[in-house]
Image (cartoon, rainbow, N blue to C red):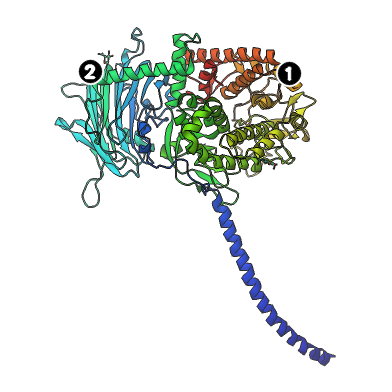
C-alpha cells in the first residue's frame, strides 16, 4: 500500500512539477498583471487625488497676472480687513496702512492699538461714506468720539498706475461735548511694507535729527516711487519712525508694539511712546538686512491732519502735485461726480428720500464697493481621495467681502448678492469679480465656498474652517448676478463683453453640471445638500453649512433619502438662467430649457415638496421633532478622583424613532423658495397660501422684515449645541428678504389671482426693512449681519455691508 502510494506519487509529483512550472509562469503573469493593476490603481488613485486641486481645463478668464493691465484699478483700498490702507492688484504688493492709538489708553498687550478692523475695538462707527471702486474714497472712523477722516484720491499719469494722495484728519466728532478732553492726544502711524515675494525694496529717507522725511523704493510692478508724509495743520508733539524687518503682513502690529519705547520730550518732563528708529538685523557677513517695513508715527493734539502722497517715478511730466490745495480741489470734484452718478443710478432724491437717507444709502453702497479686496495665495482643499487637506493652486481673488471686521475674505454665495449692487454701479468691476471667482473652478466644475488667501486672511479664520471640501456646494448665486446683468443690459454686454461671456460659458456649463450631478437626490428631480454630518451627537439638528443657511432646521437624521426644496429651486433657477445665456450667445439652449421646464413643473414640485398636512413647501427626510439637548452625566468611574469635576457636554437625545416624511413642522425661509425664486405659477393656489403665511405675524412677519424661522417651529430660537446660538432660526436676514421683496414685486406685476396681495406685501415688507435698517444704523452706527425679530435690533457681525447693503436696491426699487 505504501509502495503503491509512493508509485502513485511519482507521476503526480511530476505532474505537479509541470503544473508548478505553468503556475509559476502564470503566477508571474498574475504578478505582472496584479502589479500593473496596482500600479494602475495607484495611478488612478493618484489621478483621483489630484483632481480636487487641478484647475478647470480651459482658457482663464483673467489673463493678466499684473493688475497694471487694468491701470485704473491697479491701486485701491484692497485690504478690507484693515481700517485704512492702499495696495496694488499684484500677487505680492507694496502695502500701505494706518494704525493709531490714544497714548493715554494704549497698553503693551496691544489693547487700544488699532490696525485691523476688530469688533473688540468697539469703535462708535466706521465706514466708507463715499467710494466709487476706482478713483477716490471718503471714510469716517469714530473712536471714543474722536473722528478720524481718511480720504484718498488717485491721479492718472505715467504707466505704473499713477499717483495717489491720502489725508488723515483727526478732530472731535462733536466739539460741544467737552468731557473727552483727556483724549487730547492721538498717535497716527502710517506704514509702508513690502510683502514677502515682492521683487523690490523700500527705504526710509532721513533728514536732520534722524527725522523721517519720506520713503522711497522700487518694485517690479511699480518701478521707482516715493512716499511723503506731511503735516497739513495742527500741532505735532512727537514724530518718530521705525525701519525694520517684519516677518509677515500678519505681524505688523506686533512688530510695532515691540519697537515702541517710552522717551522724554526734549526740554520737558512729558513722556511719549516713540518708535525705535532703525532696527535692522545684522547678517552673517556683517551687513544689515534690508528693511521691508517702514513706519512713521505722528503724535499730535487733536485736531490735526496729515497728508501722505505717493508719487510714481514713471510719471515724468507731472504738472501739479496732488497735494495741498490741489488735493482739496481734486477731492471736491470727485465727490461731486460721485453724487451725480449716485443719483443717476439709484434716483433716491427723485424718489423723495431725504438728505440723511441718501447719505445713509451712499454709505451702505460705498462700504460694500470700498471693501473690495485683492487677495492672493492658496486655499486648503480636500476630497475623499486625499489623505488630508492639500493646497489649491496659487490664485488671485478680486472680490467684495461680507464684513470688514468678521469676514474680510471671499464667500461664494455672498458674492452673488454683492454682485447685484456692484453691477448696477460698474459692470466692468462686477465682470472682473466674476472672472476671478470662475477661475477658481477646478476640473470637476467645483468652486470652493470660502476663499482664504494670503497671510492676513488666514490669520482671521479659526483652523477648523480653513479646509474646503469638494463634495460641498453653496447656493449658486452668481446666477442671480448674471440674470440681473442680462436683464438690465443684455445688448451692452453683447457689444462690449461678448468674448468674456463666451469664455465664461463653458465654465458656467461645468458649474451647472457639477450641481446637477453631485447634489442629486435619490428620486429623479430631487436634490440634496451634501456635507451634513449624520454622526453628529452634539447638534440638535446637524448643520447644513453648504446651503448657506447654516443651522436652519432640516430632517433630524441626515440620510440619502433627503430632499431639499431650496436646492431644487436653486437648480431650477440656474437652468433657466443658463438657457437664457445660451440663447444670448447662440449656443444650444434646449437641454437647459428642458431641465428648467422639468424642475419648474408645479405638479412635480408639489408631489415632491408640498406637504398636504402642513399646506406648505417642505424638505423631506428621516425626521422627528422629538429631539432635545441633555447633559448626560457619565457613571462615576472608580479611577476618577473625587475632587475632579467633569462637566458633561450637552448631547442630543432622540425621544422618538425618526420616520421618512415631510419636514413640515418647520416653516421659514426654506419653505418660501419656490416663491422666492419665482418657480411657483402665478395662478397656483400654493402661491395664495404662501402669501397668506408670509404675512402672518405668528409665523414670519415682523415690523422689521421676515424672520428666518416661524415662531411656531420646534427649533425656533433654539441653540444647536450648548455653545451654538441660533443663527438662521429666527433672526431677520437681508439677502433673503431682498429676494422675497423682489419676488413679491414680480408676482404683483404678472396677471393672476394673487396680484393684489403680492403688491401689498411688496410695499409693506420693503418699507419695514428700509425703515428698520436705517433706524438701527442711526442708533448704533452700523449695518448688521442680521436683525432680531422682536425689536429689530442689529445682531451678529458688524459692520456687515455685504448683502445687508442690498437695502440700497430696496430703496431704489431695483430688482
Ligand atoms: C485743517 O485743514 C482742513 C483742510 O485741509 C480744514 O478743513 C480744517 O479746518 C483745518 N483745521 C484746522 C484746525 O485748521
Ligand atoms: C440635470 O440632471 C438631470 C438628471 O440627471 C438630467 O436629466 C438633465 O438633463 C440634466 N440637465 C442638464 C442641463 O444637464
The x, y position of residue 505, in whole percent, is: 55, 40
Quadrant for residue 271, please give it: top left
Of tags 2 and 1, which is closer to the observer? Answer: 1
Residue at 23% across, 22% down: 231
Give the numbered dot on residue 688.
1
Residue at 68% across, 12% down: 756
Residue at the top extreme? Answer: 176
Examine the rendered structure and indicate whether residue 78 appears above or below residue 766: below
Quadrant of the rendering where the C terminus is positioned:
top right
Examine the rendered structure and indicate whether residue 178 appears above or below residue 20: above
Quadrant of the rendering where the N terminus is positioned:
bottom right
Cα–Cα gap, marks 2 and 1: 68 Å
Residue 265 or 145: which is nearer the viewer? Answer: 145
**Residue 370 located left or right of residue 797:** left
The x, y position of residue 244, in whole percent, is: 27, 39
Question: What secondary structure is marked by label 1?
Answer: helix
Residue 85 or 442: which is nearer the viewer? Answer: 442
Tell me the residue that label 2 is attached to: 235
The x, y position of residue 46, in whole percent, is: 56, 57
Quadrant for residue 618, please give it: top right
> Label 1 crowding class (10 Å Cα cut-off): few <14, some 14-19, many 20+?
some
Amino acid at each position: 500500500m505504501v509502495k503503491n502510494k509512493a508509485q502513485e506519487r511519482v507521476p503526480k509529483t511530476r505532474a505537479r512539477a509541470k503544473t508548478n512550472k505553468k503556475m509559476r509562469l502564470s503566477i508571474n503573469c498574475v504578478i505582472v498583471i496584479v502589479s500593473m493593476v496596482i500600479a494602475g490603481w495607484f495611478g488612478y488613485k493618484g489621478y483621483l487625488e489630484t483632481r480636487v486641486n487641478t484647475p478647470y481645463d480651459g482658457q482663464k478668464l483673467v489673463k493678466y497676472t499684473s493688475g497694471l493691465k487694468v491701470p485704473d484699478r491697479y491701486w485701491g483700498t484692497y485690504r478690507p480687513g484693515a481700517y485704512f490702507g492702499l495696495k496694488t492688484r499684484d500677487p505680492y504688493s507694496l502695502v500701505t496702512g494706518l494704525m493709531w492709538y490714544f497714548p493715554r489708553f494704549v497698553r503693551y498687550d496691544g489693547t487700544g492699538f488699532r490696525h485691523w478692523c476688530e469688533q473688540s475695538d468697539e469703535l462708535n462707527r466706521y465706514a466708507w461714506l463715499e467710494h466709487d471702486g476706482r478713483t477716490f474714497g471718503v471714510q469716517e472712523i469714530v473712536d471714543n468720539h474722536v473722528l478720524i477722516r481718511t480720504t484718498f484720491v488717485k491721479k492718472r499719469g505715467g504707466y505704473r498706475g499713477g499717483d495717489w494722495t491720502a489725508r488723515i484728519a483727526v478732530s472731535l466728532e462733536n466739539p460741544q461735548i467737552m468731557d473727552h478732553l483727556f483724549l487730547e492726544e492721538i498717535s497716527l502711524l502710517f506704514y509702508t511694507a513690502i510683502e514677502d515675494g515682492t521683487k523690490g525694496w523700500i527705504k526710509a529717507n532721513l533728514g536732520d535729527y534722524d527725522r523721517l522725511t519720506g520713503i522711497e523704493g522700487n518694485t517690479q510692478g511699480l518701478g521707482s516711487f516715493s512716499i511723503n508724509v506731511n503735516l497739513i495743520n495742527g500741532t505735532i508733539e512727537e514724530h518718530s519712525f521705525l525701519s525694520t524687518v517684519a516677518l509677515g503682513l500678519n505681524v505688523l502690529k506686533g512688530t510695532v508694539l515691540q519697537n515702541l519705547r517710552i522717551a522724554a520730550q526734549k526740554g520737558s518732563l512729558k513722556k511719549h511712546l516713540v518708535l525705535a528708529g532703525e532696527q535692522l538685523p545684522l547678517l552673517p557677513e556683517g551687513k544689515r538686512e534690508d528693511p521691508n517695513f517702514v513706519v512713521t508715527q505722528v503724535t499730535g493734539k487733536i485736531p490735526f491732519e496729515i497728508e501722505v502722497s505717493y508719487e510714481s517715478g514713471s510719471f515724468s511730466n507731472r504738472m501739479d502735485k496732488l497735494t495741498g490745495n490741489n488735493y482739496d480741489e481734486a477731492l471736491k470734484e470727485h465727490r461731486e461726480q460721485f453724487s451725480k452718478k449716485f443719483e443717476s443710478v439709484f434716483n433716491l432724491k427723485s424718489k423723495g428720500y431725504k438728505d440723511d437717507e441718501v447719505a445713509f444709502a451712499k454709505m451702505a453702497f460705498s462700504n460694500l464697493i470700498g471693501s473690495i479686496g485683492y487677495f492672493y495665495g492658496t486655499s486648503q482643499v480636500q476630497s475623499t481621495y486625499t489623505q488630508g487637506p492639500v493646497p489649491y493652486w496659487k490664485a488671485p481673488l478680486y472680490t467684495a467681502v461680507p464684513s470688514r471686521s468678521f469676514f474680510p475674505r471671499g464667500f461664494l454665495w455672498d458674492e452673488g448678492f454683492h454682485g447685484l449692487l456692484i453691477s448696477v454701479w460698474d459692470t466692468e468691476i462686477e465682470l472682473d469679480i466674476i472672472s476671478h471667482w470662475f477661475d477658481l473652478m477646478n476640473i470637476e466644475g467645483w468652486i470652493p465656498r470660502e476663499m482664504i488667501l494670503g497671510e492676513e486672511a488666514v490669520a482671521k479664520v479659526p483652523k477648523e474652517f480653513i479646509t474646503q471640501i469638494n463634495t460641498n456646494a453653496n447656493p449658486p448665486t452668481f446666477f442671480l448676478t448674471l440674470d440681473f446683468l442680462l436683464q438690465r443690459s443684455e445688448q451692452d454686454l453683447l457689444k462690449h463683453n461678448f468674448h468674456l461671456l463666451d469664455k465664461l460659458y463653458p465654465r458656467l456649463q461645468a458649474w451647472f453640471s457639477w450641481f446637477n450631478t453631485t447634489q442629486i437626490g435619490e428620486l429623479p428631480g430631487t436634490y440634496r445638500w451634501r456635507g451634513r454630518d449624520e454622526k453628529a451627537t452634539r447638534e440638535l439638528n446637524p448643520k447644513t453649512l453648504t446651503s448657506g443657511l447654516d443651522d436652519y432646521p432640516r430632517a433630524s437624521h441626515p440620510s440619502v433619502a433627503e430632499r431639499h426644496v431650496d436646492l431644487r429651486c436653486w437648480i431650477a433657477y440656474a437652468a433657466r438662467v443658463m438657457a437664457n445665456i445660451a440663447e444670448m450667445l447662440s449656443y444650444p439652449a434646449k437641454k437647459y430649457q428642458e431641465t428648467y421646464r422639468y424642475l419648474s413643473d408645479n405638479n412635480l414640485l408639489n408631489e415632491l415638496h408640498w406637504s398636504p398636512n402642513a399646506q406648505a413647501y417642505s424638505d423631506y427626510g428621516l425626521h422627528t421633532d422629538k429631539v432635545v439637548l441633555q447633559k448626560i452625566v457619565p457613571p462615576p468611574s472608580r479611577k476618577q478622583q473625587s475632587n475632579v469635576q467633569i462637566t458633561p457636554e450637552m448631547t442630543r437625545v432622540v425621544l422618538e424613532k425618526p420616520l421618512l416624511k415631510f419636514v413640515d413642522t418647520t416653516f421659514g425661509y426654506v419653505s418660501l423658495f419656490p416663491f422666492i425664486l419665482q418657480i411657483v405659477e402665478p395662478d397656483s393656489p400654493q402661491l395664495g397660501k404662501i402669501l397668506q403665511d408670509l404675512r402672518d405675524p405668528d409665523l414670519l412677519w415682523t415690523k422689521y422684515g421676515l424672520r428666518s424661522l416661524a415662531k411656531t417651529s420646534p427649533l425656533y430660537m433654539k441653540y444647536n449645541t450648548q455653545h451654538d446660538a441660533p443663527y438662521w432660526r429666527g433672526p431677520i436676514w437681508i439677502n433673503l428678504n431682498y429676494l422675497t421683496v423682489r419676488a413679491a414685486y414680480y408676482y404683483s406685476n404678472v396677471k393672476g389671482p394673487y396680484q393684489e396681495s403680492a403688491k401689498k406685501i411688496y410695499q409693506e415688507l420693503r418699507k419695514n426693512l428700509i425703515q428698520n435698517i436705517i433706524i438701527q444704523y442711526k442708533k448704533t452706527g452700523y449695518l448688521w449681519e442680521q436683525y432680531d425679530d422682536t425689536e429689530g435690533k442689529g445682531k451678529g457681525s458688524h459692520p456687515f455691508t455685504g448683502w445687508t447693503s442690498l437695502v440700497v436696491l430696496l430703496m431704489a426699487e431695483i430688482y
